[in-house]
Structure formats: C-alpha cells, structure tokens
Image (cartoon, rainbow, N blue to C red):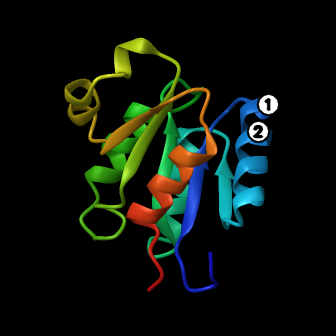
Amino acid sequence: MTATAKKILLAEDDSFTQYMMGEIFHTLGYDFDIASDGQECQDIVLANPDMYGVILMDIHMPNVSGVDAAQSIRKQAADPPKNIPIIAVTADGDYHDDQAISSTGMNGYLRKPIVASEINAIVDRYCAVT
C-alpha cells in the first residue's frame, strides 16, 4: 500500500486479535490504526474523517459496541465520516448474514478468524490509492 492509499481502522477490544490482525496488516504492507472500543473508534474517525478507507469493526466491545459505534458514525452530517465503509469482524453467528449486518448500518462482514486473502479483498475494494 502506498502513502496515498487510505488507512484501515481496526476497532477491536481483544489484545490477541489486535496483535494477530496487526501482524496480517504488517505482512501485507497496510497502514492501520487500532481503536480498543467503539467510543475510541468514533473519536478517531470524527477527528480524522478523510484518513480511513474502511473500518473493520468488532461487534461485541465494552463501553460502546460495534453496532452502536457504526450507527453513530452513520448519523453524522458530514461525509466522510458518514459513508466510510464499515465491515463487521465477528465470530458471532447472528451477524453472519447480509441482512442482519445491513440493519446495523454496516456494509458487510468477515468471520473470525480472518485470513489474509479476505483482508486483501477488503483493502482492494475500499482503500484504493487516491
């Protein structure tokens, strides 16, 4: 990924998952930031709305859940951040359904554990060089 491509924002509370996904991002050469919960994700996106091509959002997080964070981002007046693609990253089978994910304001989902090819596909789609 070049310096002009948009970054990935990973919203994930589990430190092991943060580490593993960070290793995948590093191996693939992607630039990324990590938010430890939904509130931090919202704060980061609102402070830097043009920086991110996609948000990879865990569903179950403390303080503010991924669903609540996504819905809050979608309610913003400005675009971005209003229309930044948000992809749920979850092991929860209740969210492994396009209709369920769409109702949360997210654009799609990835099942945990994530594999590199899935990350590549998301980055290719949403974080194109500008």
Q: Is residue 113 above or below residue 12?
A: above
Residue 72 is marked as: none
Query: Where in the figure is residue 93, as x and y percent of width and height?
Result: 42, 13
Image check: 32 left or right of 61?
right
Q: Residue at x 72, y 49 (%)?
A: 24
- Camera-side residue of 82 and 24: 24
- Camera-side residue of 41 and 63: 41
Q: Quadrant of the C terminus?
A: bottom left
| Tag nearer the camera, 2 or 1 | 2
Residue flagged by tag 2: what amino acid is it? Answer: Met
Q: Is residue 106 above or below residue 44?
A: above
SS for dot 1: helix
Q: Residue at x 48, y 81 (%)?
A: 129
Whether residue 40 is visible: no
Q: Residue furthest front?
A: 117
Q: Quadrant of residue 98?
A: top left
Residue flagged by tag 1: what amino acid is it? Answer: Phe
Query: Where in the figure is residue 52, as x and y percent of width and height?
Result: 50, 67
Query: Where in the figure is residue 107, as x and y percent of width and height?
Result: 30, 45
Q: Quadrant of the N terminus?
A: bottom right
Circle 2 residues within 10 Å: few <14, some 14–19, many ≥20: few
Mark 1 and mark 2 in contact (Cβ < 8 Å)? yes
User: What whole-number distance in Å separates the C-alpha atoms at marks 2 and 1?
Assistant: 6 Å
Q: Residue furthest top?
A: 93
- Camera-side residue of 82 and 23: 23
Which residue bears the numbered disc 1? Answer: 16
Q: Is residue 12 above or below residue 41?
A: above
Q: Is residue 101 above or below residue 116?
A: above
Q: Residue at x 26, y 41 (%)?
A: 105
Which residue bears the numbered disc 2? Answer: 20
